[in-house]
Amino acid sequence: MAIASILASTRNPFLCLREPTSPGSRSVVFRRYLEPCGRRWIPRSIRACQPSDKLGGDGGTSPSASRLHFGKQLLSFASDNFLPLALVSGVGLGFANPTLGCLADKYSFTKISTCGIFIISGLTLRTEAIGAAVKGWPLGVFGLISILLLTPSFSRLIMLVQLQPPELVTGLAIFCCMPTTLSSGVALTHLAGGNAALALAVTVASNLLGILSIPFWVSRYIAGGVGVSFPTEQLFRSLVVTLLIPLIIGKVIRESSKGFANFVDNNRSLFSKINAICLSMVPWIQVSRSRSLLLSVEPKVFLVAVGIGILLHLSLLAFNAASIRILSGISGGSKKNSKENATAVLLVASQKTLPVMVAVVEQLGGVFGETGLLVLPCVAAHLNQIMIDSILVNLWLRRGKDTSTNVKTA
């Protein structure tokens, strides 16, 4: 009888929902009978403190939630594409307001930023990663041969193109003689599931050996074509000071402190962004210096130079892909390891680095023409090769997902 009396006195022992009193209010009041007192249940009201992300009962998203979601997507896109955005921002800033860039050039910020790039490269260089790359040495050796000995010959074809001003073509020809990129090739290799250790080893070795090969190829393929003498000895000393010594300094700092090495490894994304900022200073300063001259270039001519840069990268990809397939078929080995090594070498051997090119042009002191005009098409070529390879990696990843899905289904 006691239980029956309690149930009779309680109209709704379960959760009740009361609509807000005003149409504009989004708070909700929950009423639950919690505590018995004699034969009555004392109601306790709980009001939601946080505003609901849903409006009405149709499941629509509130404007604030939509803005928050869009902001997160925007930040994620900026983080994933930090290097291209930094380079484009540097070019845009140089065009918009060259005063600050000219001031930075006055205090040699280009050399400082180039040294900073290679110090960071030394800080992030793992000794064990280089040792792990030994397993893929046959393709690694081909990658070095392609970067240092074979692909520079493409500059001879580029020099056959006639454009005004001629610096646009000359800059791309110099760009073709450069070693591989310092960071983007390794990053894309890691993303594609390739042998990142092999990619890193080829990157380091090609940039070190490039100090010897760059003066030779530029002197043979480019300097003779424009009728100037090439300061080989001066450039060699400059590359040692600007590239090799900062790389060694960064590596020594890393090896001297295990705690700092762990800090670098745990914050590689941060150091990658700092590297991108240093790299973006190059086009910013060069465009600021040569803004008036760059504006005099016809857009049609510049688009042709950009097209040559795209065609150059596609040609390098095709050449290296065909060569790697032939070598992989001859050497045999594990199919998985061959695919990982081939991915690493294809991406690294088909890219050319912008900072070293800028260091070379800076040391030449205007021998081949206006520095800004030499660098500008190479900035576009650098951006294009990253974007093309990013698309290629995404296609590989999508194909791999489709293949694994088909295998599971079968």
Image: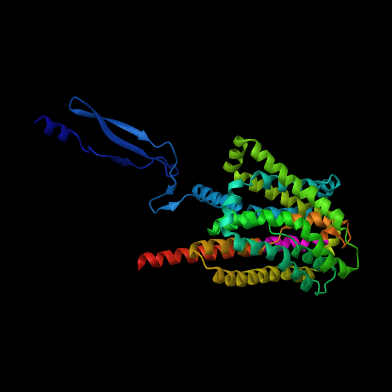
Task: Count all numbered tags in the image, as a single digit.
Answer: 0
The residue nearer to you, when weighing 85 against 62, is: 85
The residue located at (75%, 58%) in the rendering is: 210
Residue 287 visible in the picture: no
Q: What stretch is highlighted in magenta?
A: 373-385
Q: Which colour scheme is used?
A: rainbow
Looking at this view, name the residue that lies furthest to the top.
Answer: 38
The residue located at (88%, 56%) in the rendering is: 365
Residue 259 visible in the picture: yes
On the rendered image, what quadrant is the C terminus found in? bottom left
The residue nearer to you, when weighing 18 against 140, is: 140
Position of 351 relative to 15 (above/below): below
**Would you say residue 374 sits in the magenta stretch?**
yes
Looking at this view, name the residue that lies furthest to the left.
Answer: 1
On the rendered image, what quadrant is the N terminus found in? top left
The quarter of the picture where residue 221 lies is: bottom right
Residue 105 percent location from the top left of the image = 83, 48
Position of 398 relative to 105 (above/below): below
Residue 406 percent location from the top left of the image = 40, 67
Residue 133 percent location from the top left of the image = 58, 55
* Left or right: residue 18 compared with residue 288: left
The residue located at (69%, 52%) in the rendering is: 86
The quarter of the picture where residue 331 lies is: bottom right
Q: Main secondary structure of the magenta part?
A: helix
Residue 403 percent location from the top left of the image = 44, 67
**Would you say residue 286 sits in the magenta stretch?**
no
